[in-house]
């Protein structure tokens, strides 16, 4: 049995559609009993909508850049949380204050703090809008996501976060967004936890991605881009 783990945005999906014969490729992969799943920075509520609308067969979903792992039925198998004491520290950092919005992901529904220039409502996904003060008091978050106007700005803020809070968090940049997880969490660690939970060997893993937050799994496992 082999296990294929693919990023979604930019790898499988771009410009509002699946790229090439993605579904046919997945089906051919699965015919011999091999497993296919997605590893994404998205919140589960955001990716499961895509999976259902486009009839993508998955044996698992790794969300929040490896912080959360779900089985094929949507059962949460594992989640690694940002320390509660660090949540207000992150949200008061200049990078967060410059962000267009905050996405706050945990075991419950996706919550979002919207800034005046946020593009998040245009995505058409379900979320609960909360205030900044609400966010400061939150607990049990697996990921905090920030958004910026351009890639140059995003690169600068990622470097600042890594320099000033890198002993506690891992910031993962993808184009104009930064996903913040507890230190040690990335898609590679999520795959490792998936394999451990299922008793699967790591020698037969293949990974596919296109962005900076995919580098960990591409490097650690047999990676393609």
Image (cartoon, rainbow, N blue to C red):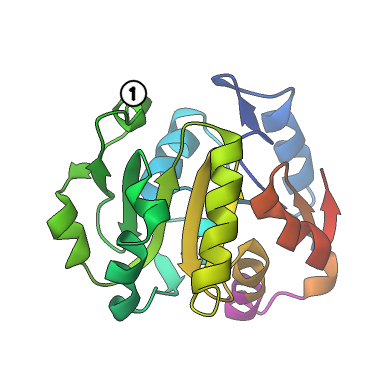
Answer whether residue 94 is visible to the viewer in this image.
yes
**112 lies above or below 160:** above
**What residue is rendered at 52% in x and 33% in y?**
55
Q: Is residue 108 left or right of residue 196?
A: left
Quadrant placement of the N terminus: bottom right
Q: Position of residue 153 (x, y in %)?
A: 54, 40
Q: Quadrant of the C terminus?
A: top right
The residue lying toward the viewer, choosing from 8 and 145, is 145
Location of residue 192 by image quarter: bottom right
Q: In which quarter of the image is residue 147?
A: top left
Q: Residue 11 placed where, x, y %?
A: 69, 36
The kind of secondary structure the magenta stretch mainly shows is helix
User: In the rendered image, which residue does mark 1 sit on?
Assistant: 122
Q: Nearer the viewer, residue 8 or 104?
A: 104
Q: In this view, does 61 lie above or below 129?
A: below
Q: Is residue 81 left or right of residue 20?
A: left
């Amino acid at each position: 049995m082999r296990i294929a783990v693919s990023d979604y945005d930019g790898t499988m999906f771009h410009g509002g559609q699946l790229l090439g014969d993605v579904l046919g490729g997945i089906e051919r992969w699965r015919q011999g009993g091999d497993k296919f799943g997605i590893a994404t920075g998205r919140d589960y509520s955001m990716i499961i909508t895509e999976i259902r609308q486009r009839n993508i067969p998955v044996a698992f979903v790794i969300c929040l850049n490896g912080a959360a792992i779900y089985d094929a039925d949507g059962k949460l198998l594992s989640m690694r949380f940002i320390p509660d004491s660090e949540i207000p520290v992150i949200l008061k950092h200049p990078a967060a204050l410059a962000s267009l919005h905050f996405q706050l992901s945990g075991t419950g529904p996706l919550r979002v703090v919207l800034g005046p220039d946020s593009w998040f409502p245009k995505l058409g996904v379900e979320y609960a809008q909360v205030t900044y003060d609400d966010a400061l008091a939150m607990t049990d978050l697996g990921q905090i996501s920030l958004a910026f106007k351009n890639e140059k700005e995003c690169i600068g803020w990622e470097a600042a976060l890594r320099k000033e809070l890198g002993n506690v968090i891992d910031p993962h940049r993808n184009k104009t967004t930064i996903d913040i997880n507890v230190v040690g969490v990335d898609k590679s660690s999520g795959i490792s936890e998936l394999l451990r939970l299922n008793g699967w060997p790591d020698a037969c893993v293949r990974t596919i991605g296109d962005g900076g937050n995919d580098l960990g799994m591409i490097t650690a496992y047999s990676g393609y881009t």
